[in-house]
Amino acid sequence: MSKTYNQRLIKWTSITVAVMFILPFAVAKLASECAGMALCMMLFLVINPLYSILLGIVAGQNIKALWNLPLISAVAFLAGAWLFFDIHELWFIAYAAVYLCIGIVAMLIMNYLKRK
């Protein structure tokens, strides 16, 4: 793997950690209960799926080097959700699995489009 792809992997892993850790922390610690519920729904149903698609598109440009970005994103989401929401709910695993599937599908579509 070349230095450029290592730098891209480090850059996108850092962004993933920021999105999947800082946003849940901000929602859990800084928002009121009413606003926190709305922000959680927006985070889980809009922001995280869109970020998974974006990460899949980035990973699809070079699957050999960046195939693990969707997996890193799903694991970071699960760690952040369990850590900051302080609820060890098993449904967070389902959300992480859906985000992983979204990222993998976007990655494969991007790779297919790139080859055409």
Image: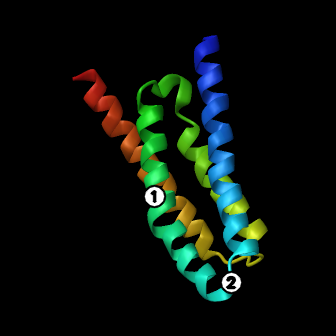
Residue 7's image quarter?
Answer: top right
Q: Which is nearer the eye, 22 or 13?
A: 22
Q: Residue at the location (55% across, 24% down)?
A: 65
Q: Is residue 60 left or right of residue 75?
A: left
Q: Which is nearer the eye, 87 or 7?
A: 7
Residue 1 appears anywhere in the view: no
From the top left corner, tell me how far across and down residue 111 is, in percent.
34, 30
Q: Residue at the location (65% across, 61% down)?
A: 23
Q: In the image, which disc is placed on residue 75?
A: none
Q: Residue at the location (42% across, 48% down)?
A: 53
Q: Which residue is mark 2?
A: 32
Q: Residue at the location (64% across, 31% down)?
A: 11
From the top left corner, tell me how far across and down residue 8 is, in percent.
59, 25
Tell me the kind of residue under disc 2. Answer: Ser
Q: Which is nearer the eye, 110 or 46?
A: 46
User: Vertical placement of 28 versus 23: above or below?
Assistant: below
Q: In the image, which disc is placed on residue 49?
A: 1
SS for dot 2: loop
Residue 50's image quarter?
Answer: bottom left
Q: Residue furthest top?
A: 2
Q: CA distance from mark 1 to mark 2?
A: 24 Å
Q: Is residue 67 left or right of residue 21?
A: left
From the top left corner, tell me how far across and down residue 39 is, in percent.
56, 74
- Mark 1 closeness class: few <14, some 14–19, many ≥20 residues within 10 Å: many
SS for dot 1: helix
The residue mark sitting in front, 1 or 2, is 2
Number of callouts: 2
Q: Is residue 85 left or right of residue 111?
A: right
Tell me the kind of residue under disc 1. Answer: Pro
Quick one: quadrant of the C terminus? top left
Mark 1 vs 2, N-terminal side: 2
